[in-house]
Image (tube, rainbow, N blue to C red):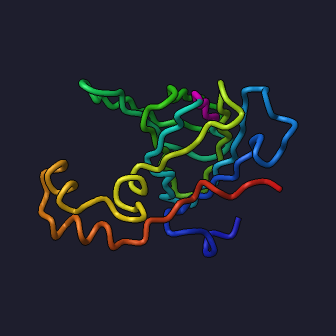
């Protein structure tokens, strides 16, 4: 992969699901290839309809997920080629390439042929129309000017490159 053409997150997710391969319909599975530049990040996201199993094919990834309220406990591991990690359905999770070379992983979604994806930063600060900056300021306990700045950022998504 030519990293100079990849997005500023340094990652690319290529999804295979019933949306682009109708034969997967009703099978309850989906698949994605994740490509990471050095220090590339697949940002925190959730899948409301599927558990994800990630297998590292090349490189080193720091991966983790956060349990739901009230604990919000972070579980993380550093994985190398051949290692596998499970992200429970609906929990926020991420992958980060800690290595100096590219990394590749395969993620399987189990339980739904359409796992859905919600990238946390996009869902919170990139909505159209935006969530009220007063709501954010009070909920997150930060200054309204910081909320305005966050909402003005270009919130990108690396999760919609689909196999045709």
Q: Which residues are magenta?
A: 50-55
Q: Foreground residue, 60 or 3?
A: 3
Residue at the spot x=68%, y=40% of the render?
106
Q: Residue furthest right?
A: 23
* Residue 98 in view in this figure: no
Q: Foreground residue, 143 or 10?
A: 143
The answer to whether 67 appears left or right of 5 in the picture is left
Residue at the spot x=64%, y=49% of the render?
34
Q: Foreground residue, 117 or 73?
A: 117
In this rendering, the answer to whether 161 lies above or below 51 is below
Residue at the spot x=49%, y=46% of the render?
118
Q: Foreground residue, 47 or 95?
A: 47
The answer to whether 157 appears left or right of 164 in the picture is left
Q: Quadrant of the N terminus?
A: bottom right
Q: Position of residue 13 (x, y in %)?
A: 64, 53
Q: Position of residue 63 (x, y in %)?
A: 47, 39
Q: How many marks?
A: 0
Residue at the spot x=47%, y=50% of the render?
119
Q: Position of residue 91 (x, y in %)?
A: 44, 32
Q: Position of residue 116 (x, y in %)?
A: 59, 41
In this rendering, the answer to whether 135 lies above or below 64 is below
Residue 133 among magenta residues: no
Main SS of the magenta part reads strand
In this rendering, the answer to whether 92 lies above or below 155 is above
Residue 53 among magenta residues: yes
Q: Quadrant of the C terminus?
A: bottom right
């Amino acid at each position: 992969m030519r990293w100079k053409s990849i997005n500023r997150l340094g990652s690319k997710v290529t999804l295979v699901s019933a949306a682009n391969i109708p034969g997967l319909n009703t099978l309850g599975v989906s698949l994605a290839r994740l490509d990471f530049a050095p220090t590339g990040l697949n940002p925190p996201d959730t899948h409301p309809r599927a558990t994800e199993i990630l297998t590292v094919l090349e490189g080193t990834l720091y991966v983790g997920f956060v349990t739901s309220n009230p604990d919000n406990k972070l579980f993380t591991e550093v994985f190398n080629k051949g290692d596998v990690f499970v992200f429970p359905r609906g929990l926020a999770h991420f992958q980060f390439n800690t290595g100096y070379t590219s990394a590749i992983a395969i993620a399987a979604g189990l339980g739904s042929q359409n796992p859905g994806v919600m990238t946390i930063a996009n869902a919170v600060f990139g909505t159209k129309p935006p969530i009220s900056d007063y709501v954010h300021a009070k909920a997150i306990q930060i200054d309204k000017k910081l909320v305005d700045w966050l909402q003005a950022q270009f919130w990108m998504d690396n999760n919609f490159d689909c196999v045709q």
